[in-house]
Image (cartoon, rainbow, N blue to C red):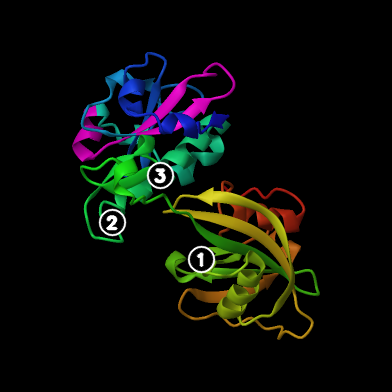
């Protein structure tokens, strides 16, 4: 798919080099949305020669394509401000939201969009050093920031991108029911499995136990790892687990009342397509994958 090609990032002047490379392609990102190509049977990223990108745009080297028609070609992302984005396209329908179109994109486009959005979100919040308060600028092809006016090798101050791990958990009781909760931000009409951030010095499994007690008042046991999903909203990775209600736990979940406003145990019948009355997570999310794994089949909801 994409070789992130970290060795190339270290070459002095690599972005100018890639801008001059006729094989280099660039995707465009503005306001958290990516520019989509016109026409076709489904959404796909618009990729243009790097040399056509405005000099004022922030460029980041994403890597080199490893297969398919674009094999071997380097790809960058241009992060645009509002005026630069309008100069590229004023058609709002051509700027795609990752959460809305992820399942429709080809794997290469989905991976590039996710990577680009995550690194762009990090740059947007690190214009100043958290250590010294000094203004910072990108280095290493966009994968580090350092004090303005200094080469990162000279400054000794490297600010690297961060990813915040969060566990997301399907809890199953002794009746084989799945626990779903309604988040306050959703208005109470959409339900999902529970999630929470991993704290410093904490294992993923310990975070599962702690977070489920904090959000639902339940003790869980035997956390089993299911998989992970990068979630660049703004800078997370979701680590999926399934866990069983502990034998010594209370059976009635209690929402924390702040983040979670309702909690319910669901049978498979209650979540089946014909009788379901609640919204569930979109197909592009690991939350949906955890629910469908327990359910035993895909669900028809979008």
Between the residue at mark 3 and the residue at mark 2, the CA separation in whole angstroms equals 16 Å
In the image, is 111 to the left or to the right of 53? Answer: right
Please state which of the two labelled residues, at mark 3 or mark 1, is closer to the viewer.
3
Residue stretch rendered in magenta on the structure: 60-87
Q: Is residue 288 magenta?
A: no
Label 2 vs label 1, nearer the camera: 2
How far is the residue under mark 2 from the one under mark 1?
A: 41 Å
Closest to the observer, 243 or 268? 243
At 56% from the left and 39% from the top, the residue drawn is 103
> In which quadrant of the rendered image does the N terminus lie?
top right
Across and down, in percent, residue 219 comes to: 69, 80
Mark 2 and mark 1 lie on one chain; the one further toward the N terminus is: 2
Query: Is residue 300 left or right of 76 when viewed as pictured?
Result: right
Position in image of residue 173 (x %, y %): 76, 73
Q: What is the secondary structure assignment of the residue under circle 2?
A: loop
Residue that label 1 marks: 189
Q: Badge 3, how many Cα within 10 Å: few under 14, some, many 20+?
A: many
Vertical placement of residue 225 versus 173, above or below = above
Point out the tag, 3 or 1, that comes first from the N-terminus: 3
Q: Residues within 10 Å of mark 1 (few under 14, many from 20)?
A: some
- Disc 3 versus disc 1: distance between alpha carbons? 32 Å
For the question of whether residue 245 can be seen, the reply is yes
Give the vertical position of 88 relative to 252 (above or below).
above
**Secondary structure category for the residue under label 1:** loop
Q: Nearer the viewer, mark 3 or mark 2?
A: 2
| Left or right of 55 in this view: 140 | right
Residue with the mark numbered 2: 129
Picture residue at 27% right of the left edge, 29% below the top: 89
Circle 3 residue: 119
Asked if residue 206 is positioned above or below residue 230 in the image, the reply reads below
């Amino acid at each position: 798919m994409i070789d992130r090609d970290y060795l190339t990032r270290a070459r002095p002047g690599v972005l100018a080099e890639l801008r001059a490379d006729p094989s280099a392609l660039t995707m465009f990102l503005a306001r958290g949305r990516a520019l989509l190509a016109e026409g076709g049977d489904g959404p796909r990223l618009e990729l243009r020669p790097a040399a056509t990108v405005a000099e004022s745009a922030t460029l980041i080297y994403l890597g080199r394509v490893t297969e398919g028609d674009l094999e071997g070609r380097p790809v960058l992302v241009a992060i645009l401000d509002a005026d630069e984005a309008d100069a590229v396209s004023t058609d709002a329908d051509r700027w795609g939201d990752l959460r809305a179109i992820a399942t429709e994109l080809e794997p290469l486009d989905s991976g590039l969009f996710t990577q680009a959005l995550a690194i762009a979100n990090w740059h947007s919040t690190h214009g100043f050093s958290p250590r010294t308060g000094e203004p910072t600028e990108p280095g290493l092809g966009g994968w580090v920031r350092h004090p303005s006016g200094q080469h990162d090798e000279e400054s000794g101050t490297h600010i690297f991108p961060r990813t915040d791990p969060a566990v997301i958990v399907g809890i199953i009781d002794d009746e084989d029911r799945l626990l779903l909760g309604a988040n306050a931000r959703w208005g109470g009409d959409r339900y999902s499995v529970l999630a929470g951030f991993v704290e410093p010095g904490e294992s993923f499994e310990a975070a599962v136990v702690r977070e489920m007690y904090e959000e639902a008042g339940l003790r869980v046991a035997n956390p089993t790892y299911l998989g992970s999903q990068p979630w660049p909203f703004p800078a997370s990775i979701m680590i999926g687990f399934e866990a069983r209600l502990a034998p010594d736990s209370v059976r009635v979940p209690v929402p924390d009342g702040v983040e979670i406003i309702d909690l319910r145990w669901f049978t498979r019948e209650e979540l089946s397509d014909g009788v379901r009355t609640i919204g569930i997570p979109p197909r592009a999310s690991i939350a949906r994958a955890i629910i469908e794994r327990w359910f035993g089949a895909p669900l028809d909801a979008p």
